[in-house]
Image (cartoon, grey):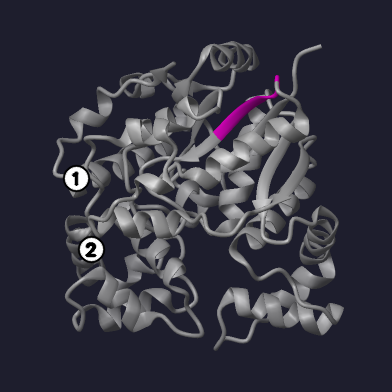
Amino acid sequence: KMPETAAVICEYNPFHNGHLIQLEKIRKIKGDDTRIVAIMSGSIVQRGTLAIYPKYARAAAAVKCGADLVLELPCPFSCGSAEYFARAGVMLADLTGIADSLCFGSESGDITALEEAADRISSPEFLSALRNPDRTESHQRNTENLYHTMFGSACPTTPNDILAVSYLSAIKSLKSSLQPFTYKREPGFTASGTRKTILSGGDASAMLPPQARDSFSGIKPTADALCSAASLYVIRNTPAELLCTFYGMNGGVSGCLRNNADAAATIEELVSLCTGRKYSASRLRRAILSAVIGIKPDDMTAPPYYTTLLAANSRGREMLSAIKKTGFPVVTKPADGKLLPPHALPQYSLGRKADALFALSRKEPPSDMIKMMPTIV
């Protein structure tokens, strides 16, 4: 019998000690011979920003720290809301045909309570009632208020519990065979805290496993100024009737951004002017990135049509051979993307645009991204 393969949907932005603990916990719960496939965001991440380090460096850190295979969660899903991010990750784990289970950390660590919340949130009664939201509130607040009204208890509100409910809802709605399991996250390990330290020029070495420090050494973190300038230009100069057609620009977001764009000198200022009860900062940033890259709502609801190999060890290479037998397209070198089946090319092209924006922000030529090779450990 083949050893079990656990999937992790992740960003590793950057890979820190909390991520190392997760990989160790998976093998403690499932056995030492468990294989781990990480489905990881590429150049743009779920909070609507660029990743702090290139995807190949982040993937190399993960494999050196215990993952066996790292595949890319393609753009546009990597910058979708929790629902789209989770759904595409679960689909990719299914479509590649190698994963038996899905592991995720959560603040509660209670799979029964999370599954109950996922069942309630994806029930027809709840979804039907959510179609008439309070227009002055954000989607998350409307969800929380309705949940409390209908079920008399609080729905999960912490970031990883919300994501956990999204994973469980996706497994249920896609009728996926993935067996979900969770563990209680230990406090004190956050990607945002690690990024803050790195970006402010502080010493983050205590927050990163030695192998990850090794993978990031000599790589400068991504600065936001150039991406911010390009994004502000797009928001100011895209005709209103076109701006509202991009993903996340519905519900008045495009008008709010347009109305405030001339009063802001940076994207952070613009986001801060528009953030309030109705729009969260992450929702606004995702919408802005979608306009810059050209992501439409239909792109976000499509399934992932391909993935890119970012890093692997010898067990990962065996897993890769198993994926190839399913016929699901895996790009092993970026330059080979043009050989994908025709229906996958528009999605691949969005990924190239995300990589080009990432390269621009790092003052690197986009051609460098095409020459990148996966790390084989």
Q: Position of residue 81 (x, y in %)?
A: 53, 59
Residue at mark 1 to residue at mark 2: CA–CA distance = 19 Å
Q: Amino acid at mark 1?
A: Arg
Q: Is residue 25 left or right of residue 117?
A: left
Q: Residues within 10 Å of mark 1 (few under 14, many from 20)?
A: many
Majority secondary structure in the magenta region: strand
Is residue 237 placed above or below 27 in the rendered structure?
A: below
Q: Answer whether residue 243 is visible to the viewer in this image.
A: yes
Q: Position of residue 196 (x, y in %)?
A: 34, 60
Residues 295 and 281: in front is 281
Q: Residues within 10 Å of mark 2 (few under 14, many from 20)?
A: some
Q: Amino acid at mark 2?
A: Val
Residues 179 and 242: in front is 179
**Residue 35 highlighted magenta (yes or no):** yes
Q: Is residue 258 left or right of residue 208?
A: left
SS under mark 2? helix
Residue at the image point whose x is 41% and y is 28% from the top: 60
Q: Answer whether residue 94 is visible to the viewer in this image.
A: no
Residue 234's tag is: 2
Give the magenta range: 33-38
Give the residue number, with chain letter if any, for mark 1.
362
SS under mark 1? loop
Going from N to C along the chain, the mark reached first, 1 or 2, is: 2
Residue at the image point whose x is 28% and y is 71% from the top: 268
Residue at the image point whose x is 73% and y is 47% from the top: 182
Q: Is residue 51 left or right of residue 361?
A: right
- In the picture, which quadrant includes the C terminus? top left
- Quick check: marks 1 and 2 in contact, CB under 8 Å? no
Residues 333 and 26: in front is 26
